[in-house]
Image (cartoon, rainbow, N blue to C red):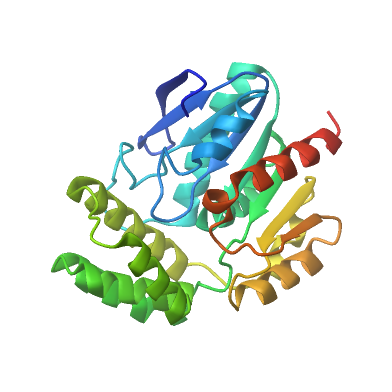
């Protein structure tokens, strides 16, 4: 976000949790919700490009720095209350309903939020929500992750997460090779690990029932990469069937990391979608 001046501020959620927001640009408000392991910088180039004609709001979700880490487990009710507080702040600032955009776990949060409160949301854009990774079947993975977290075992944490996300071994290997000898800042890595732990807690208490999202009536855009591994393609097909009025874009040659690998594709898709949504 180099070409636009950004402003960090915070809002308090219903339970008093302090959420830090980054706001940049001017125009119709867009709220970008990051996935697991993310934060204020997650949307990078996407946010910077959108800020040329939109007021972009990026919250750091609870558990992710510099927002608060509340004690105890997290649920999607917490996430929903948090995101409603963010949406209300963006609506108050601009006087207009928001375009809500979620990536990965952030897309699942966005679905929960719009199902609970849609009056302040003008449109919904979802990139590959991991709706298959939920419920009792991931409890063992949550337990493994928590144990690895408590003994500060980064490799053990990664192994548990790979089982949750179903990332193929060859993709894991490619990422490891690309990272080389680079190491993450230990403070940021710890905050990301805490965030992942709480995201897994929420997922373990959630459901894989995709039919429940049929209650979503706001204009919706579904985005995905053609190269993302199963069960994401099947999940997106089921979601598209559940939301028959949704627009859908599938990018050839892209996978679950398109917001980083091809951000302009995402920006162009969002701009085109926003332009078609009734005011």
Residue 138 in view in this figure:
no
Residue 96 in the image, given as x and y percentages of width and height:
70, 23
Residue 268 in view in this figure:
yes
Residue 47 in the image, given as x and y percentages of width and height:
55, 34
Examine the rendered structure and indicate whether residue 23 appears above or below residue 212.
above
Residue 179 in the image, given as x and y percentages of width and height:
32, 60
Q: In which quarter of the image is residue 142?
A: bottom left
Please give left or right for residue 178 compared with residue 232 in the image: left
Examine the rendered structure and indicate whether residue 80 appears above or below residue 12.
below
Residue 183 in the image, given as x and y percentages of width and height:
22, 55
- Tell me what residue is drawn at x 33 percent, y 75 percent: 160
- Tell me what residue is drawn at x 52 percent, y 40 percent: 83
Residue sitting nearer the eye, 31 or 43 = 43
Residue sitting nearer the eye, 122 or 165 = 165
Q: Quadrant of residue 150?
A: bottom left
- Tell me what residue is drawn at x 59 percent, y 45 percent: 263
Q: Residue reaching furthest left?
A: 151
**Callout count:** 0
Q: In which quarter of the image is the C terminus?
A: top right
Please give left or right for residue 93 compared with residue 135 in the image: right
Residue sitting nearer the eye, 177 or 22 = 177
């Amino acid at each position: 976000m180099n070409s636009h001046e950004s402003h960090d501020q915070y809002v308090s959620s219903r339970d008093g949790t302090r959420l830090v927001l980054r706001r940049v640009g001017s125009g119709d408000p867009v709220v970008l919700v990051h996935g697991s392991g993310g934060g204020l910088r997650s949307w990078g180039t996407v946010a910077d490009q959108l800020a040329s004609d939109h007021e972009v709001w990026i919250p750091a979700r609870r558990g992710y720095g510099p927002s608060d880490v509340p004690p105890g487990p997290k649920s999607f009710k917490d996430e929903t209350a948090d995101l409603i507080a963010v949406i209300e702040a963006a609506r108050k600032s601009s006087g207009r309903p928001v375009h809500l955009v979620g990536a990965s776990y952030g897309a699942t949060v966005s679905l929960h939020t719009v199902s609970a409160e849609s009056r302040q949301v003008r449109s919904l854009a979802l990139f590959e929500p991991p709706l298959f990774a939920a419920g009792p079947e991931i409890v063992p993975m949550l337990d493994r992750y928590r144990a690895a977290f408590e003994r500060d075992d980064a490799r053990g944490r990664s192994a548990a997460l790979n089982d949750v996300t179903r990332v193929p071994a060859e993709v894991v290997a490619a990422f490891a090779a690309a990272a080389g000898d680079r190491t993450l800042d230990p403070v940021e890595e710890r905050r990301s690990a805490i965030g992942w732990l709480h995201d897994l807690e929420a997922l373990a208490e959630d459901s894989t029932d995709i039919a429940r999202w049929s209650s979503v009536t706001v204009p919706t855009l579904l985005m995905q990469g053609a190269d993302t591994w199963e069960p994401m393609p099947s999940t997106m097909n089921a979601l598209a069937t559940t939301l028959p009025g949704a627009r859908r874009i599938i990018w050839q040659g892209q996978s679950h990391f398109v917001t980083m690998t091809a951000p302009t594709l995402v920006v162009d898709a969002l701009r085109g979608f926003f332009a078609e949504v009734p005011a």
